[in-house]
Amino acid sequence: MSAGNKSVVVIGGGPGGYEAALAAAQLGAEVTVVERSGLGGAAVLTDCVPSKALIATADFMDRFSAAKRIGVHFDGAQVPGDQGVTAHIADVNSRILDLARAQSRDIAERLESAGVEVVQGAGSLLPDGRVQIVEGVDEVDSGEEPAPHDEDCEEAQARRELEADLVLVSTGARPRVLESAKPDGERILTWQQIWDLQELPEHLVVIGSGVTGAELAHAYLGLGCEVTLISSRDRVLPGEDADAANVVEEVFRRRGMTVLNRSRAGAVRREGDGVVVTLEDGREVQGSHALLAVGSIPNTSDMGLEEAGVRLSPSGHVEVDRVSRTSAPGVYAAGDCTGVFPLASIAAMQGRIAVAHSLGDAVAPLSLGKVSSNIFTDPEIATVGVSQADVDEGRVDARAVMLPLTKNPRAKMQNLQDGFVKIFARSGSATIVGGVVVAPRASELIFPIALAVANRLNVDQFSATFTVYPSMSGSLSEAARQLHEIAD
Ligand SMILES: Cc1cc2nc3c(=O)[nH]c(=O)nc-3n(C[C@H](O)[C@H](O)[C@H](O)COP(=O)(O)OP(=O)(O)OC[C@H]3O[C@@H](n4cnc5c(N)ncnc54)[C@H](O)[C@@H]3O)c2cc1C
Ligand SMILES: NC(=O)c1ccc[n+]([C@@H]2O[C@H](COP(=O)([O-])OP(=O)(O)OC[C@H]3O[C@@H](n4cnc5c(N)ncnc54)[C@H](O)[C@@H]3O)[C@@H](O)[C@H]2O)c1
């Protein structure tokens, strides 16, 4: 089909926005992307890509520590934790920022070659549904140089108004901060400010043990910092599979992280060369730096959404249906500003669905039952489909088999000490409906389970497929085999 006579304006150039723009251009629409800071969005410039690049360095450092256990000694040289092998955070951060900017440039080139117009500026909605653009560039927290403004800013600040058949709001979210813990960009930091650090924190206090807090606490521990993780709940990663979260918490502690459970931060203040975090029960935790990882706030205020008829939830997220429609005709929304499931992959999918639905292409509504996601700790936690909580709370009638990876021959050879695979199969039909993998590179190992979930394979079809010997995937097959025995 062709949407040659249709126009699309996308506000926000993150994964939700730029993927939608590419899809719309492919369908022949005339597409404009309005982005106020950098293409690729927070995902590329400050959040997803930089954090995964930091973790890659931390994982590399970990290999030095593990070497002795498989018989490798560095004659004369030393390992992290001793003097000698250290992460130079200024170099690490400089590589990360280069990588993020390069990815942002790649996206700009893809959009350009697809014929998409990119306007640097802030977009908002007028009450009649048109898009108003105030041109100019916001400073990017990643440290990227803002594009030069004209001497005479009149032109750079010009206002434009665009009318479009489809307006997509994909403005993302920003770090939530505590009133009593204002980030200063030096010692009290959000995750978007850590990329400018020139010195490795001596003692980092991470506040919040959701996915962001856990991943970054793991990364800085691996880089050689002393880390204290303040978790307001009974365990780290409260929203995740409890068996998986317990493994990761145990590994954190074993490697020397201090994890304070049931501890809520009330305030953070600077004191001397460091910070003091006051917990709500009055205890104090001292460190050299504090990192706030207490959730996000959608970027939906002051842009005319409600005045244009776009309904927001009490948390400020744009309310959307499964084809990304908002309550205002012709206005769709995608990504973190909708709060549906804050992942880059979901943002991109919501954006593509919006375009297909609005421009009349074939479209399947968003289905969250088959989403794979991964937490990049060591070991990683990858999940897909039905969760243990779905089964325990009676939402899905399924059985589970969980096998420790320490019994797997390949894992033994690699000196793997922690991890498991878990598969959920529907009672009766034995169709695979979900799984959890806790292992190094679990993000890759989850794919066979995701394939089974997406294609409704049963445990017999899954386990009849050859796996390599020795391999970690042998344990996936074994779990499926054991589910057959249970189903009998
Ligand atoms: C530390 C961290 C690590 C993460 N790691 C992963 C991961 O490994 N895998 C994963 O799938 N997800 C990850 N996520 C989640 C992922 O980053 C988000 O889900 C993703 O960024 C959402 O994309 P988006 O397009 O909705 O928003 P964003 O990426 O935030 O992009 C929104 C864009 O809109 C722009 N904008 C905002 N308002 C306006 C306006 N008025 N006018 C013009 N432009 C505007 C912003 O400048 C921004 O560029 C991570 C998140 C965090 C915080
Ligand atoms: N690898 C990935 O794909 C990845 C990585 C990071 C984030 N994300 C996405 O972002 C989402 C949000 O994750 P997040 O971790 O940024 O936010 P979150 O809201 O999931 O976690 C924030 C945590 O901080 C805690 N908290 C709040 N106030 C506190 C206080 N005063 N003291 C101590 N703890 C406090 C909350 O109880 C919560 O557990 C994830 O669900 C995920 O979808 C994905």
Image: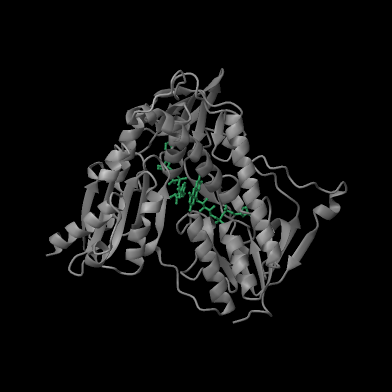
Residue visible at 51% across and 34% down in the picture: 291
Q: Give the percent coordinates (x, y) of residue 263.
A: 37, 32
Q: Examine the rendered structure and indicate whether residue 183 appears above or below residue 140.
A: above
Please identify the quarter of the rendering in which residue 132 is found: bottom right
Please identify the quarter of the rendering in which residue 248 is found: top left
Q: Give the percent coordinates (x, y) of residue 74.
A: 43, 23
Q: Give the percent coordinates (x, y) of residue 393.
A: 24, 56
Q: Nearer the viewer, residue 230 or 225?
A: 225
Q: Nearer the viewer, residue 404 or 333?
A: 404
The N terminus sits in image quarter: bottom right
Question: How many marks do you count on the picture?
Answer: 0
Q: Give the percent coordinates (x, y) of residue 372.
A: 40, 57
Q: Nearer the viewer, residue 444 or 258?
A: 444
Please identify the quarter of the rendering in which residue 360 is found: bottom right
Q: Nearer the viewer, residue 99 or 159?
A: 99
Q: Residue furthest right?
A: 152
Residue 238 visible to an observer of this rendering? yes
The C terminus sits in image quarter: bottom left
Describe residue 282's horizontal placement relative to residue 41 as left or right. left
Q: Examine the rendered structure and indicate whether residue 466 appears above or below residue 277.
A: below
Ligand 2, image quadrant it occupies: top left
Residue 266 visible to an observer of this rendering? no
Describe residue 100's horizontal placement relative to residue 251 as left or right. right
Residue visible at 63% across and 57% down in the picture: 13
